Image (tube, rainbow, N blue to C red):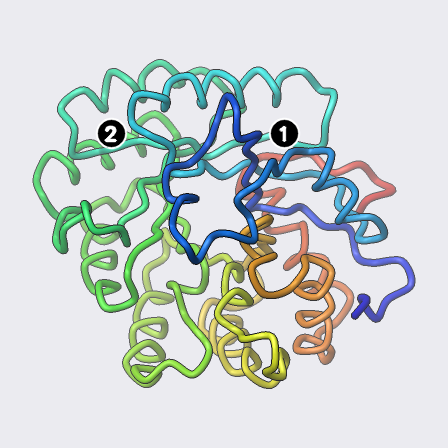
């Protein structure tokens, strides 16, 4: 499946993971379900797999690396962004806001324009429900707002109410809701998810990435049919100015390719105007992350 436009709308991919299996190897890749992506996934592979997609910039997303490797990962991606040699120009790095040392860690990047924000994956077993509402966590996420950094939510869909409480407790911090609030195809709790997304969209300091959901579609299913309502619901609730494209490469490759994901979105959003598509694929990300767009890429 290829995107339906011969020359695609310019894309800022807001959700790019990278690992080489030597310097950086996420521990969760050892799980049986990750066998298809348990291999080097570097910029070389990404560039090969995005040919023809008109990806003009990308934002690196942390890979839930071991805690002891966080600083190394952050320093590495900062240097890559500042090098100016690749399309990766900004990064969201790993951090644990409940850790008493988090503030000192975050302060290291206060004046680093490449590091735009932080994320802790909150859908793993060692992140207990309610962790994001503990006082140290809240205080440190407020601190992120005070230094101009963002926080990404990657949280179990059943805990979206907790995420909303955190966003309301930190009105001066900007948040990104990853993966449509971790929506999934054929979700038995679809109605609850819809209600939560509608409520989340009413919080002004939150934007949403339409990303990460193609991995929930089994190979034999009709991707467009399965994801149509999720994408349309998020787009409708958050509106054309508060949604951003995210590729979630290489995790998307567990079921479909990044080319398939873009083509699916092109079809689901086929009724949107060129201006609206330009915002979704790049313009909103350009504004949110502070990524300049050249005139020929607008």
At 41% from the left and 34% from the top, the residue drawn is 117
Q: Check the image and report above or below for 19 versus 169.
A: above
Q: Secondary structure at mark 2?
A: helix
Mark found first going from the N terminus, 1 or 2:
1
Provide residue 246's location: percent of width, then percent of height.
Answer: 57, 53
Instruction: Give the farthest residue toward the right.
Output: 6
Q: Is residue 232 left or right of residue 195?
A: right
Q: Residues within 10 Å of mark 2 (few under 14, many from 20)?
A: many
Q: Secondary structure at mark 1?
A: strand
Which residue in the structure is indicated by mark 2? 143
Q: Check the image and report above or below for 187 versus 263.
A: below
Q: Is residue 70 left or right of residue 286?
A: left
Decide which of 131, 148 is in the foreground and name it: 131
Provide residue 78's location: percent of width, then percent of height.
Answer: 53, 20
Q: Nearer the viewer, mark 1 or mark 2?
A: 1
At 52% from the left and 65% from the top, the residue drawn is 215
Q: Point out which mark residue 89 bears.
A: 1
At 72% from the left and 77% from the top, the residue drawn is 267
Q: Is residue 145 left or right of residue 165?
A: right
Q: Point out which mark residue 198 bears.
A: none
Q: CA distance from mark 1 to mark 2?
A: 24 Å
């Amino acid at each position: 499946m290829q995107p339906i436009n011969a020359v695609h709308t310019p894309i800022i991919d807001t959700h790019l993971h990278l690992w080489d299996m030597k310097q950086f190897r996420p521990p969760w890749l050892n799980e049986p379900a990750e066998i298809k992506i348990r291999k080097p996934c570097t910029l070389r592979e990404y560039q090969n797999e995005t040919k023809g997609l008109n990806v003009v910039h990308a934002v690196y997303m942390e890979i839930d690396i071991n805690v002891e490797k966080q600083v190394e990962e952050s320093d590495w991606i900062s240097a890559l962004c500042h090098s100016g040699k690749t399309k990766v120009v900004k990064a969201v790095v790993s951090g644990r806001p409940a850790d008493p040392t988090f503030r000192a860690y975050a302060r290291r990047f206060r004046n680093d324009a490449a590091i735009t924000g932080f994320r802790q994956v909150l859908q793993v077993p060692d992140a207990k429900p309610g962790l994001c509402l503990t006082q140290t966590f809240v205080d440190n996420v407020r601190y992120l707002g005070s230094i101009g950094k963002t926080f990404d939510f990657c949280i179990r869909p059943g805990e979206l109410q907790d995420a909303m409480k955190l966003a309301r407790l930190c009105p001066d911090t900007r948040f990104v809701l990853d993966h449509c609030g971790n929506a999934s195809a054929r979700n038995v709790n679809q109605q609850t998810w819809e209600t939560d997304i509608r409520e989340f969209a009413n919080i002004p300091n939150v934007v949403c990435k339409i990303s990460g959901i193609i991995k929930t579609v089994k190979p034999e299913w009709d991707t467009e049919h399965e994801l149509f309502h999720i994408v349309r619901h998020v787009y409708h609730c958050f509106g054309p100015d508060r949604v951003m494209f995210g590729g979630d490469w290489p995790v998307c490759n567990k079921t479909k390719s990044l080319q398939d994901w873009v083509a699916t979105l092109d079809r689901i959003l086929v009724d949107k105007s060129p201006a609206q598509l330009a915002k979704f694929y790049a313009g909103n990300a350009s504004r949110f992350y502070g990524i300049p767009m050249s005139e020929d890429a607008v």
